[in-house]
Amino acid sequence: MTATTQERTPPRPVRQIARAVPLPAGAGMARTLVERNYVSFRRTWTIIVSGFFEPVFFLFAMGVGIGSLVGDVELADGRAVPYAVFVAPALLASSAMNGAVFDSTSNVFFKLKYARLYDSVLATPLGPRDVAVGEICWALLRGLVYSGAFLAVATLAGAVTSPWAVLAVPAATLIGWAFASIGMAATTYMRSWADSEYVQLAIMPMFLFSATFFPLEAYPEALQWVVQATPLYHGVGMVRELMLGDVTGAMVGHVAYLGVMGLIGTTWAARRVETLLLR
């Protein structure tokens, strides 16, 4: 083929390339969308910071207030720990879940259905998979900030008893990835703001009944397997093991569960966003 023929050959459209190349190669410019979100939110940083206070309030209300009435909590291995020490890891895991779900549902739904932001994004070299991966990564960054700040407060409050707790931040990031990816995939099916109630209906029971505020053994035996099947239970168990310094073989199961959930959610979200934006 001559050089003249090569010059006249039209390049393949970016959208066709995005369809032809599987993940993660089809999401190589997702960082550009993350940068866009950072620039957009840096003037309204107080909105992001406000999300940090909810788990802190819960820590002092549940851990310190109710903890003074409950006393110590006996763990499965027979150890007894103060209630604040028991509940702090669960609140960190729940904070990662709530932040990721909120950012990947309400914010993404507004950009998708009302602001029509992604229609403008597709006029650039970015593709639909970049949109999916970029929004999920942005939710992870917010969760990382929340987790690190909450861990610092929990340490000052005396609710951290092991140096393993430093790994609770990347663990919370894994939780955020799992829930953000599934949340964004679910958002692509939302028709109106009323559908967001279904999101709350899904996460509220997990927040209350994933061994968050009392041990798994407190549940009836018939319900324990249901609790263990929920994703937040694995997030709480993973962070609790790290913050209590009791790392066991169950950690592998927790990480595998959330990792597979994140992979499935990211692939699902990318395909759904591609279907919606390129139809």
Image (cartoon, grey):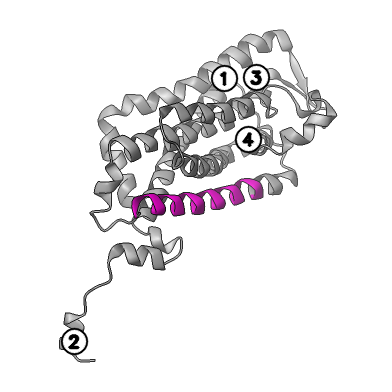
The image quadrant that residue 204 belongs to is top right
Q: Residues within 10 Å of mark 4 (few under 14, many from 20)?
A: many
Quarter of the image that includes the C terminus: bottom left
Q: Is residue 235 magenta?
A: no
Nearer the viewer's eye, disc 3 or disc 4? 4
Identify the element where label 2 is drawn.
Answer: helix
Q: Which residue is mark 3?
A: 84
In the image, what residue type sits under mark 1?
Ala
State which tag comes first along the sequence, 3 or 4: 3
Residue 112 is situated, as x and y percent measured from the top left of the image, at: 34, 40
Q: Residues within 10 Å of mark 3 (few under 14, many from 20)?
A: many
Write down the region rendered in magenta. 256-278
Q: Which residue is mark 2?
A: 5
Q: Is residue 276 magenta?
A: yes
- Cα separation between marks 3 and 4: 19 Å
- Is 136 left or right of 5, judged from the image as shown? right
Q: How many circles with numbers are drawn on the protein?
A: 4
Q: Which residue is mark 1?
A: 157
- Cα separation between marks 1 and 2: 71 Å
Residue 30 vs 245, above or below: the answer is below
Residue 131 is situated, as x and y percent measured from the top left of the image, at: 36, 49
Residue sitting at x 28%, y 42%: 117
Q: Residues within 10 Å of mark 2 (few under 14, many from 20)?
A: few
Q: Are marks 3 and 1 in contact (CB under 8 Å)?
A: yes
- Cα separation between marks 3 and 2: 72 Å
State which tag comes first along the sequence, 4 or 2: 2
State which tag comes first along the sequence, 4 or 1: 1
Q: Which residue is mark 4?
A: 232
